[in-house]
Amino acid sequence: MLNAAATSFRAGPKSGFSIISAFGNKGAAMNSLSAKLRELLRKLLKLALGALFGWIIAFIEIWKRVCRGRASAPPAQPCMTIPADVYKRPDPMIYDQYELLANGIAVTWDNPDIKLYRNDKEVAAMDVVAGGHYRIVARCWNGSFDGAAVGLRVRFSYLSFGVATKSNEIGISKTDLGAKGTPSCPAFAEIEWDAPTEDGHYCLQAELLWEDDLNPGNNLGQKNLTVSHFQSPALFSFRLRNDATWRRRFEMLADDYVIAPLDPCKTVEPDLQRGRRPKRSYATQRREALALLAERQGRDKFPISDGWSVVILPSVVELDPEEEISVTVKLVPPDGLPHPRKTINVNAFADGRLVGGVTLTGEG
């Protein structure tokens, strides 16, 4: 009975044992699934570790190659120097009083490279008529035998007559400047100008603008010229202004330099006469030219001629920032002699540095 009952109990479709048996089978299935998942995760982890190990080995090999390449490579250079025969640079230039005086060379402020015309006739800067219409022409040179300055910009401006006075821009013109020794050197830039309506003398400026200039220090030319008639003595006056933001000491020095006649080209550039370009570098040519000019036309070689007297009032003065005064110059001819034409230059230095100047001419 008991065995039969037990058997019946095990076999009963709705018995509790059957339910437990069913749950047991389901647990076994879950265990089997869990084992399969663990096996899958183990394989994936093995693959991931293998890939990571491979990447590490590859990185080490690449790093070794890089290190070997660095060890065998030449030292890195901070920049690359382009040979002069590959990269050609121009040197636009004009008669620049500031550069010449900085190299100890005497100058005139009657700039030979700046001309003023009215009705196609040249006029002097001191003869400008208030409100008149003029044409200003700047002659531009090139110190380079190789580089041209196509589209060279030239900025024109004017100042009231004097030293360090305020500049007023007229405008910008363009010209095409060829290399030194070519037909397009020198080149000319010009601009129309309506003079101010106020009476007075004016200084003209021409500045050459080129971004990649071999020597940007020779690009500003200035024309300051006035004439007075001798009336024992000839009297001149000009304005002196301190355009700095600190107090400065100004000193005015006079000389009677005028531009000497030019030497024949054959004595200056013999190579050009034979159709060859000089073998000397630009720096060497410039150094030699400045040394030759200083030897022939040094500032100390043109004192005021014997018998003439120049009185500058004041000759030395200290000015505050933006302070402006009038300077008077007396040009006295020798006693008992006719009053011939006489030209002098007055250069102004602030704390030993050139800040401008004027050229004054006395006529009998």
Image (cartoon, grey):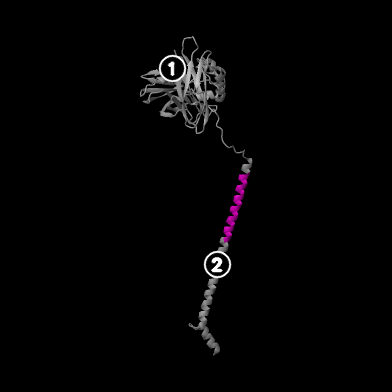
Residue drawn at x 48%, y 18% is 330
Q: Which residues are magenta?
A: 45-67
Residue drawn at x 40%, y 18% is 122
Question: What's the magenta bit mostly, secondary-structure-wise?
Answer: helix
The residue labelled by disc 2 is 36
Q: Residues within 10 Å of mark 1 (few under 14, many from 20)?
A: some
Secondary structure found at label 2: helix
Is residue 50 within the magenta segment? yes
Identity, as a three-letter code, of the amino acid under mark 1:
Ser
Is residue 229 within the magenta segment? no
> Which image quarter: residue 362?
top left
Identity, as a three-letter code, of the amino acid under mark 2:
Lys
Query: How far across and down, in percent of the image, does residue 242 sit?
Result: 49, 29
Query: How far across and down, in percent of the image, does residue 247 sit?
Result: 52, 32
Q: Is residue 149 visible?
A: no
Query: How far across and down, in percent of the image, does residue 109 sit?
Result: 47, 21
Up the image or down, 24 lies above or below 324; here it is below
